Structures are given as structure tokens and as C-alpha cells.
Image (spheres, helix red, strand yellow):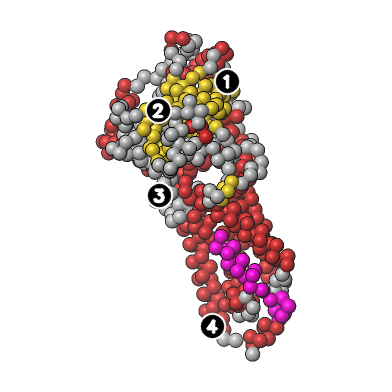
Amino acid sequence: MNNTSQLARMLLLIAIMAVLTLTVLFFAGKLPHQKLTAQEFINLQQGDNPHARFRRAHAKGICIFGNFESNGNLASYSTANISHKGTTPFLGRFSVAGSNPTAPDLKTLVRSLAFAMNSDTNHEWRAAMNTPPVMAVANPYDFYEQIQALSPDPLTKKTDPEKIKVFLAAHPESQAFNDWKATYKPTNSFATEMYHSINAFYLIDKSGHKQPVRWVAVPQAIEQDLPKLDSESADALQIQLSKILENNSIKFDMVFTLANDQDDENNPTIPWPKDRKKVTAGTLNITSWEVQQTGKCGEMNFDPLVLPDGIAATEDPILRARGAAYAESYRRRVKETLLGAKESSTTHSRSQP
Amino acid sequence: MLKKVQRHTLGVSHEFNKRPLRQHTTITLGNGTNYYIDAVPRSSMIQSLDIWQMEAVKLHKSFGILALVLVIIRLFNKLLSRRPSLPNDLPKWQKLAAHITHFGLYALMLAMPLSGWLMQSAGGRVVGLFGWITLPQLVEANMTLYSIFREIHGYAATLFFLMIFMHVGAALYHGLVRRDGFLSSMVSGK
């Protein structure tokens, strides 16, 4: 046998395998890349000192249970189960923004309400809503920059006004968000906030017609009727919530706003005009609570891309980015729980309202 | 002449029949498709923040179930047909490697879709096949189980690639370097 040709064929084999390896690594994103990944996003959110076993964003929260009482008004717009008149139990969570699971409730600007209903079925609906009605930016890459600009310096623990100014100048689309921020004052309860879907979704009817909508959970509670906040407590909002639920349920109307042709459902930075048609779909009744460390909501990933038949995601880039980011945060914290990792924060204390 | 001798070493009774070959192709396509969905250029499905990510995950699940169906059919067929024995003069370690790779490939072809299905069930999510059918939940929603199956799914994928590389590398070694007719018996189906 010819040794030269034997060697050549061996080299060919090596070359083919090398090309194959590089192709696989390239497509798997293992080679140097410029595009921001969900992993890098979560790295930024969790910071240098991640709180093991907790969500990387909106780490501090409290589990809630209740039911969604649909009035049937949505049925002509969506084939979703929940659009028909009837009652559906849900598992949910109130939370405050940030990666610190022991942050003082009253120190954070953004509050959230999440729920999941009809789990284990095609009719499952998970939602994660926040107090701002719009986003400051329109895609996850700008969102990353926004978090970088707004984050306090790790040494001085202070935000850099110059950095924020530069960011805002580069992102005029943040106008509506900044207007909201300038006038918004957090209320004295989880029960009296408005929680917005922020991103738009499609309601799909029997004929397949897609109606872009945003929704908001509008509180029925009135602040004067609620137990007073203990503003000294780091868990002020949670303690108050548990007090309300001793005797009463907490109710929110689910109000859907229907976009028209002038509205861009894929841009979460622009509020839709006030005169758009609104449909109240029913009421969220919150009846009980649990601490998140041992409660059911700790096990749940409130990924807003989990939608029932009859509701679909728009191509809003922020909305679409939430799936991969939530999954990464979830994967990390459940793995830490599995492996028994200790919460790294020295100030850790279980919130026990 | 040389070819005839080598053919003889493979043994007439151990030749591939065409059905498994077709299945080899479809299984490769099935798994391959899922890989390319999983890894659209520059960032993989679990890394991407782009708008196609959600659709990719949906397709990934469906193709995974399709791959599971194909491998089950393949395994039944394997029971019914014989595979060609390795060339007699192959060094022992290569024979061992071949057996490990073959066993590993089948084990992983089952483990990949099953761990995916299990992790979805444990995460409280349903798995379907292109929206035509909805599969039953294998386990109750449970965070610990989710984490176990999620990590198995990830590590099994890496191991799967290693096995595929050994498989392709060995096939090319037979075809290009040894030229013992073993690769052509796979390709021609004779």
C-alpha cells in the first residue's frame, strides 16, 4: 500500500472531523460570539454576588392563591378556555424588583404580579405583570445597556448620573417610560397597584383573527380600607398582604385594551391612546398566601410565553426574549436548590409575615 | 480482487438490509434537524434572546418526539435483523470502542427525547407533536425533578455529540484509511 496516499487519506479524515467539530461548536454558540446571550443577561442581573436558590430578577416575593372569575366578555375575541364564563384557580406571586431576596419592600420602585393557571394542559396561561405600563427600550440588547447604565457602581454603590444621561440621550424611545416614572408614586399596598402586561399579545378567535391586546390588573381595593403599613419593616408589603387576607380577598379586574391599526403591537415602549376599546374579562380573586421559600410559587417559572390556545405572543422582541432569560434564571436556582447551595447573602432572613 | 476478500471478512450473513439503512438516514435527519433548530447561527436555542427562540423551542420539542418515535421503530427493527460484524482483524480496543459507541448512541437517542419530555412534565409544561397531538404528562410538576432532568438533558447532549463524533470518525476511518468495505456496506445497504 502506498504510504503517501495512506497519509493523505488520514489527513483528509482529520480535516473532515475538524470541520465537523468547528461547525458544531459554531452553531452551538461555543465559539467567540458578539451577540448577547440569555446567560450573559442573567449574569448581569444577578451581579457579582448571586443569591443562590432565588430568582435572578424579582427575587423577593410572596406566593398567592386564588381564582380567576371570567365573565365571558373575552369569548368573542379568543378561543382560550379562560375567555369563557367560569372560575379557574391560579397560583401566583407578588414581588418587588431586584436580585436581592431580602431587599426592603418599600425601597424598590417596580412591583409585580404573576400568575399561572391551568398548568399541565394546553390551556395553561402564565403571566408576569409589572407596575410600569411600558418598557424604556424596545429590545433585549438595549435593555441590557439600560440595566448597565442604571446599575450602581460596585465600589461606590451609587448610580452614575452621567451614564444615565448618556443612555437616555441615546434612547429617545424611553420617553414614555420616563414620563411614567416622573409621575408615578408607589402605593401603600400590593393590593392597590396597577399591574400591566407591558408587552402585547394576540387574542385569536374562532375564525383565526388575531386581535392585538395589552392587559392590566386594576385593583378594586381602596387604600383607606387597608391595614396600615409598618414602614419600618423590610417586609412591610408582605405583612400587610397577610393581614388583608386574614379576613378578605384581594380583587383585581382584568382589563384588556384592544389595539387598532395605528398601534404597533411589537413595540413595548409606546403607550396606546386612551380611547382604545377596553374589555373587562373578569376578576382575579386572591384568597391566601404562602412564603415563597416553602410555597408553590417558588417552584414556578412565570414565563409569559406560556400561553393557552387562543392567546399568542406578538413579535415584540422584549417579550420573545423573556422565555430564554426566565429559563436560565430558573435553571440556575433549581439546580442550586437541588445541590443544596447556601444563600450567599449575609443579611438573609426568611420573610415571615 | 482485494475488495472481494474484504467483503468476505464481513461475512455474507451479516450484511445490512436496506430498511435499517433508511432508518439510519431518517434518524440522522431527525436528530440533525433538532440540532440545527437548537443552534441557529451564533447562539444556541438556550442562549438566544431573539424572536425566533420561542418558535425554535416549539419545533425542538416536536422534532425530539419525532426522533423518539424513529428510534423506537429502529430498535424494533434491530431486534428483527442482524447487523454486520466488525472486520476480524480490527484491534481489540477498536472493537470495544465500536460496541461502546453503538450502545451509547442508542442509549442517548432514547435519553435525549425522554429527558426532554420528563423535564417539561416536571416543569408543568405539556409536550406536543406539531400541535397535532398532546402527549401525557410523565411526572407531576416538581422543581427537583425538573432540575435533574434539565441537567441530564444538557449533559446527555454533550455526550451524544461525542458519540456521534466517534461514530462518524470510525466510519470515515473504515472508508478512508482502512478501506475494508465496512463503510460501503453501510452506504450501499448491501
**Alpha carbon of mark 2 to alpha carbon of mark 4: how far?**
76 Å
Residue A5: image tag: 4
Above or below for B152 versus A68: below
Q: Residue at x 44, y 39 (%)?
A: A205
Asked which secondary structure carries label 3, the reply is loop
Name the residue rendered at 55%, 63% in the picture. B29
Q: Please determine whether, in this image, residue B64 is positioned above or below residue A286.
A: below
Q: Is residue B91 left or right of residue A261?
A: right
Quadrant occupied by the C terminus of chain A = top right
- SS class, disc 4: helix
User: Could one spot residue A207 in this view of the protein?
Assistant: yes
Q: Earlier in the sequence, mark 3 or mark 4?
A: 4
Of labels 3 and 2, earlier in sequence is 3
Identify the mark nearer the N-term, 2 or 4.
4
Q: Position of residue B140 (x, y in %)?
A: 65, 38
Height in image: A351 above or below B178? above
The kind of secondary structure element at disc 2 is strand
The residue that disc 3 covers is A35
The local crowd at label 2, few if under 14, some if 14 to 19, many if 20 or more residues have their Cα within 10 Å, is some
Return the residue at label 1: A288
In the rendering, at what x and y percent does residue A283 appear? 48, 23
Q: Residues within 10 Å of mark 4 (few under 14, many from 20)?
A: few
Checking the image for residue B73, the label placed there is none
Q: Nearer the viewer, mark 2 or mark 4?
A: 2
Q: Are marks 1 and 3 in contact (CB under 8 Å)?
A: no
Q: Which mark is residue A279?
A: 2
